[in-house]
Image (tube, rainbow, N blue to C red):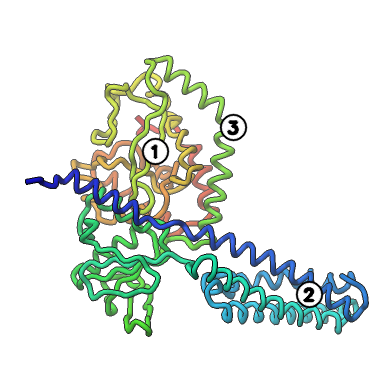
Amino acid sequence: MNRVTPKLLESVRHVAVESKIAPSLERRRLRTYVLILLADGALFSLAFALGSLIWEGRWAEPRSMLAAQAMLPAFYTIALYNGSYGLKALSDWMFAARQALVALVISAGLINFLAFYTKSNQDFSRAAVTLGLMFSAILLVVLRRVITGFIDWRWKGRIANRLVIDDGGSGFPYPDAIAVSAKDFGLDPGSHDPFMLDRLGKLLRNQDHVVVSCPRERREEWAFLLKSAGIYGEIVSEPAHSLGAIGVHRYDALDRTTLVVSTGPLRLRSRIIKRLFDIAAASAGLLVLSPLLIAVAIAIKLEDRGPVLFVQRRLGRGNQFFDMFKFRSMREEKLDQNGDRSTARDDDRITRVGAFIRKTSIDELPQLINVLTGDMSIVGPRPHAIGSQANKKFFWEVDRKYWQRHCLKPGLTGLAQVRGHRGATEVEKDLTDRLQSDLEYIAEWSLLRDIQIVLKTVMVLKHDRAY
């Protein structure tokens, strides 16, 4: 009789998970928002040019076009904040049209108010501007109807990824959502198995909305995992203080109520800003440091003819594994792929070149490539190997909140590092000090703080615990 070994079962589950990974719809939405934004600007110009033609007898009369150009920045500002370029606007054309018209009316009122106090009203033709506003309103509404019609036709109305995880709860028949069974994929919210968390991370990848249906006694554990994954998650449940719910979502059509327990640490705008900073900094870093990188690579190769790079599996965003690059600093035959043994002072595994590049943190520079590929960020919690321990305990055994540090991409440097919390984790405090700094960074992220951490990193590249 054939027996299913744990390794075979893990392999089968991995294949099943890979088939369930959702394509990213966020980029598709971003492209659509940009398209609508550009189209709105073009329609403004068209509407005011048409208004001036009808009233002034001249296409794109300069005074009318000046009114359009003055109003457009105010319109964009209001529209960006009232949801005109938001998720709901892609699925509900009446909502999108209403919000666009609100932005149009308010921007027209603001410009008129400013023109009154600056005594520049006489510079504009009231009739031509009024016609321009009327045509703008019509064109804005038509555009919203066309966009939602296109989405219904081309995308089958699918603008967001939704996932329902059934872990033995009351069920949740969410329309247009992918439903998976926690049992089928070996998902146990009470487990600290990194391979299970990697499977879950892959299932949650690119999901915009995740709902978990589970028994009462497992809700707190699922709430913790959703927060650790850094995604928008809900638990099918009545209000419960212990879950740390941040809102309630009612589904009248389904006769269900969920608790919102996580939304992810950064909003879309913040993620875009952080990513642009990462790309700019990593690209500049690779360009400026390329002579150093080449010299180090040659030195490593000349010392023992072994590989230049050391590739190690680390825990990344959403508790998913990724391959992290470093310059090889240890002897090839003594490489530690899982990080089971912490590096010690005068470690016999470290080469002469390796000792220098570790002391100066040069061995970490290839991670700029990880930043460009999107696995890492310039600033964030440092990624750890799965075998890392403190006081002979795995990191997650020291403090369960360890998993929550992975709701952001890991960083080349971080708040913990500039505070001096680096090197070997010999005692539990070595880990808890880093964890406290990592969670503080996640809760208080800002671009200015990222820049400050990068600048401070330069001052701590050489450190007495870097060995």
On screen, 233 above or below 92?
Answer: above
Displayed quadrant of residue 360: top left
Q: CA distance from mark 2 to mark 3?
A: 49 Å
Displayed quadrant of residue 109: bottom right
* Quadrant of image for the C terminus: top left
User: Label for residue 324?
Assistant: 1
Q: Position of residue 200 (x, y in %)?
A: 30, 56
Instruction: Tell which of 258 and 24 is nearer to you.
Output: 24
Instruction: Give the residue displayed 52% in from the left and 74% down from the top.
Output: 91
Instruction: Tell which of 173 and 52 is nearer to you.
Output: 173
Q: CA distance from mark 3 to mark 1?
A: 21 Å
Displayed quadrant of residue 359: top left
| Secondary structure at numbered mark 3 | helix
Q: Earlier in the sequence, mark 3 or mark 1?
A: 3
Residue named by callout 3: 288
Tell me the kind of residue under disc 1: Met
Residue named by callout 2: 47
Q: Position of residue 231 (x, y in %)?
A: 39, 62
User: Label for residue 165?
Assistant: none
State left or right for residue 335 relative to residue 298.
left
Marks 1, 2: nearer the viewer: 2
| Secondary structure at numbered mark 1 | strand
Q: Earlier in the sequence, mark 2 or mark 3?
A: 2
Label 3 crowd (10 A; few <14 / some 14-19 / many >=20): few
State left or right for residue 403 relative to residue 66.
left
On screen, 257 above or below 74?
Answer: below
